[in-house]
Image (cartoon, rainbow, N blue to C red):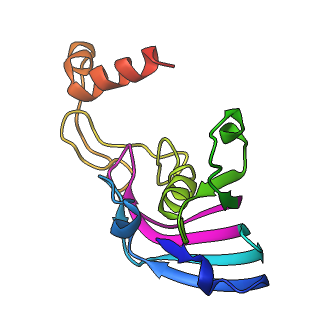
Amino acid sequence: MRLLLEEIPEGVSNLKIKCSPAEIDLESDGIYFNDPVIAKLKLFKQIDKVFIKAELSVDIDLECARCLSPIHTILKGSFENQYIPMPKIQSSIMDDIGICYYTGDCIELSDDFRESLLLELPIRILCSENCKGLCPKCGQNLNEVKCDCKLEFGEVQKSKFALLAKILETKK
């Protein structure tokens, strides 16, 4: 996703961009994109410096980590960066927060778009805080149906779901 400097007018302007998740390398396992990414940009250009305030959104479907039910949500992200030409002599100033560099006659926004949206993804996705998950014996979704499985103490410990729960507990 590139912005040509010559197409950005001096002063303040607004721009709305649509791009596919593939264009900004946003595709990921377990995330299903229903629509393109929508970016609303507020731009301020002064000679060769460009300040960009961006608000991004994309309609996605995810799976609950406990019961595997589909979850529909809108992922929203934002960023504010100042873009200036790459200095001829590179020095320690390259680590300034909020300052990005461009070369040539365009500003590359793909990394900023991708980073902004990926940072907003929750680490663990749940359909609800009190999701009961799946039965470790029969795999039934316990939010929808109460199964009749009787798990004995030894069976619960041998279950693959129980082993997973132990592993997750030890990592906390």
Residue 150: give x, y in percent of width and height.
23, 30
Q: What residue is at 54 percent from the left and 71 percent from the top?
A: 106
State the residue in front, 148 or 5: 5
Q: Does residue 103 sit above or below 3 in this rendering?
A: above
The image shows residue 80, relative to residue 50, as above or below, that is: above
* Furthest-front residue in this view: 88
The image quarter in which residue 46 lies = bottom right
Q: How many marks?
A: 0
Q: Image point 29% across, 52% down: which residue?
A: 29
Q: Nearer the viewer, residue 27 or 89?
A: 89
Question: In this image, 150 relative to 84: left or right?
Answer: left
Would residue 119 appear left or right of 131 to someone viewing this image?
Answer: right
| Residue range of the region highlighted in magenta in the rendering | 53-82
Query: Is 62 colored magenta in this rendering?
Result: yes
Q: Quadrant of residue 3?
A: bottom right
| Residue visible at 36% across and 24% down in the picture | 165
Q: Quadrant of residue 137?
A: top left
Q: Is residue 66 magenta?
A: yes
Q: Is residue 159 left or right of residue 130?
A: left
Q: What residue is drawn where x is 50% and y is 67%?
A: 73
Q: Is residue 100 left or right of residue 124?
A: right
Q: Kindly report the secondary structure that dominates the magenta region of the rendered protein.
A: strand
Q: Position of residue 100 (x, y in %)?
A: 65, 53
